[in-house]
Image (tube, rainbow, N blue to C red):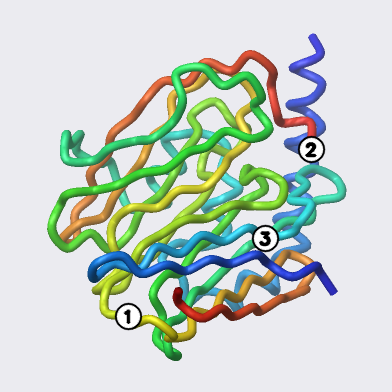
Amino acid sequence: MKATRRQAIKTTGAMATLVSLGLVTQSQAQAAVDRASFDVKTMADALKAIGGTPATSDQISVVSPDIAENGAVVPVGASSKLADTTEIYLLVEKNPTPLAAGFVLPAGTVADVQTRLKMGQSTNVIAVVKAGGKLYSASKETKVTLGGCGG
Amino acid sequence: MADPMRIRAALAGDTTTVRVLMSHPMTTGKDAHFITDLEATHNGKTVLKGMFSGAVSQNPFLSFQFKGAAKGDKVSVKWVDNKGDTRTDEVAIA
């Protein structure tokens, strides 16, 4: 039941953030997706916010460990061999807000980014890539021993 | 003012690898405080734009690569958080 309580706290918090961010979002709309996309609660809505359902592609590699001992700090990355890759998104399926990070890559930047994400529980990590104006994705499952969404 | 970032930029062949370690609590929920946007530039030209959520770990790490730089060129990284705080740091490519 602890998980449910956490979920509830996070959800209310996220709503408050959404409201308080109202003005900031307006001024930072130069990026590829709206700031609100980071507050949606389901994978389906997150994909919608990015621009639609991506096609699965074996040209994308998702870097995420098989087992993460500490869900607060999980090394996650994605690379794409698709020509003209312009955007990379990292999504954690079972997080309260699946869309974790997004990157815009101008020409000359290699389609390979790595960062560290929090994961509340064992989950699929999905990389969505925009290449040549179309969306592609790949996913990898990571088992989390100790959840990291308390922060 | 937040603590400085640790940035390393190293050229190998024609590719520069940039690794950034930001100093930020990255909290979510009621006291949400996290980096929302970041931008990396090389000699004033954007090489990466990033958008973060609170799902990025505390003291965010970021690594990326770009082409077309020379040793000694400047790489600058700027972030903005949800409370309007911002920080910019710069490093020369080694």
A83 left or right of B58 in image: left
For label 3, the residue is B22
For label 1, the residue is B69
- Given the image, what chain letter belongs to the residue carrying mark 3? B
Image height check: is B41 above or below A15? Answer: below
Type of the residue with mark 1: Ala
Q: Mark 3 and mark 1, same subunit?
A: yes
Label 3 or label 1, whichever lies nearer to me, is: 1
Q: Mark 2 and mark 3, same subunit?
A: no
**Quadrant in which the N terminus of chain B is drawn:** bottom right
Image height check: is A23 above or below A91? Answer: below
Image height check: is B61 above or below A46? Answer: below
Type of the residue with mark 2: Gly
The reply to whether dot 1 and dot 2 touch (C-beta < 8 Å) is no
Label 1 or label 2, whichever lies nearer to me, is: 1
Type of the residue with mark 3: Met
Residue A138 visible? The answer is yes
Who's the residue at 81% across and 69% down the image? B2
Horizontal and vertical percent for residue B49?
46, 69
- In front: B86, or B70? B70
- Given the image, what chain letter belongs to the residue carrying mark 1? B
Label 2 or label 3, whichever lies nearer to me, is: 3
Task: List the single residue furthest toward the top.
Answer: A1
In the rendered structure, find residue A151 and report the number of the disc placed on it: 2
A115 left or right of B1 in image: left
Labels 3 and 1: the sequence-earlier one: 3
